[in-house]
Image (cartoon, rainbow, N blue to C red):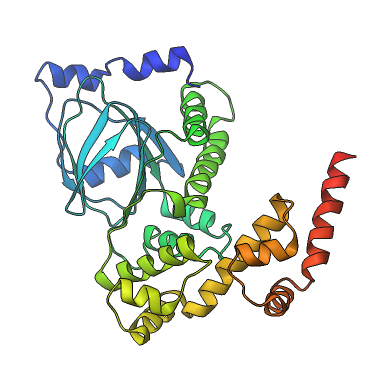
Amino acid sequence: MLDANVHEELTSYTDRELSLLSKDFKLNHVFTKRVKRQFFQDKHIYIEKQSRFVNVPLHSHDYIELVYVYSGQMHQVVNGKPVVQNKGEIMLLNQFAQHEVEAADDNDIIINFIIEPEFFGRLISLFDTDNLITEFILSSINGKKRLGEHIHFKVGENKEIQDSVSKIINEIYGDNSLKQIRVNFLVGLLITELLSNVESSDYYVSMNYCESLAVTVLRYIEDNYRTASLKDISNKINQPNYKVSRLLKSFTGKTFSEILLQKRLEQSVYLLKHTDYSIIEIINMTGYENASHFYKVFRDKYQVSVKEFRDNIKLDTQDLAS
């Protein structure tokens, strides 16, 4: 929860906002250069409250930006798409995104996180590359394709993420001598928390038609892994089977069958770790029709049998409890 004194500081007028209200302020239109000089002074991350009462013209920048709405709303146009960000929601923009921002009102408190691409790149290296949707989106946000990309996380009701942001803001306004290190660590945790749940988030990523189709197919597999088939998704997106296969191979390096197998294995591991379902029940729940085939692909992937895997989990749990 946000500290009461920090809340008061956030809602108070800054000198810049007072100047804007008095009509005695001119926006510096050399936006990218001004921001770079002001924000990046031997820091991987810079965080500030966005000034209210002034429109920000169309611009792009050479850093990754994470925008959080503390209260009210934020109205902007990102890569040509009008976006309304509500309280608690987060927008992640890569360094090639273009956006313009409508002047915020009195109740619109917006926090900007300015992140160097190098910091984000190091963060990506820590992710589990088995999650293809996350990997695909991370590559886009990190600018590998040099396209303007953004994700709109509608997480206003997600208590864990809201608590994470509150910790960061409290730290920024605190006086801890290790503030910068702590902020870097907390921002890294926030981003991993967001992207670890990206499949279930309501997000938007601007991309070309083929990329959009690829993400549609990946999302279909995530949501329908028990019954998913190449024929079914091809019919849904009105594309021939061979084109869908070629598209996935081009963008992910894996075939439809390989991705589906990967998702079913991920889900079976989750159920083995976190439920008491029998192995046969898990096989049925994850879409496998042949138990022998499941046992074989599981051993090939994890180098142990399913039973050994679950037994090891039980031993680890007992060790933690003792």
Q: Residue at x 37, y 62 (%)?
A: 140
Please state the horizontal and vertical placement of residue 174, each as a whole percent of the image: 51, 21
Would you identify the image quadrant in which residue 297 lies? bottom right
Looking at the image, residue 231 sits to the left or right of residue 190; the answer is left
Would you identify the image quadrant in which residue 295 lies? bottom right
Question: Please, is residue 322 above or below residue 192 in the view?
Answer: above
Q: Residue at x 59, y 30 (%)?
A: 178
Q: Residue furthest left?
A: 23
Looking at the image, residue 192 sits to the left or right of residue 151; the answer is right
Please state the horizontal and vertical placement of residue 219, each as a whole percent of the image: 42, 63
Q: Residue furthest right?
A: 322
Q: Residue furthest bottom?
A: 242
Please state the horizontal and vertical placement of residue 12, each as a whole percent of the image: 31, 14
Please state the horizontal and vertical placement of residue 192, each as a whole percent of the image: 52, 48
On the question of residue 254 being in view, the answer is no
Question: Please, is residue 205 above or below residue 177 in the view?
Answer: below
Residues 211 and 105: in front is 211
On the question of residue 30 being in view, the answer is yes
Q: Residue at x 53, y 21 (%)?
A: 175
Residues 121 and 210: in front is 210
Would you identify the image quadrant in which residue 213 lies? bottom left
Looking at the image, residue 243 sits to the left or right of residue 161; the answer is left
Residues 17 and 150: in front is 150
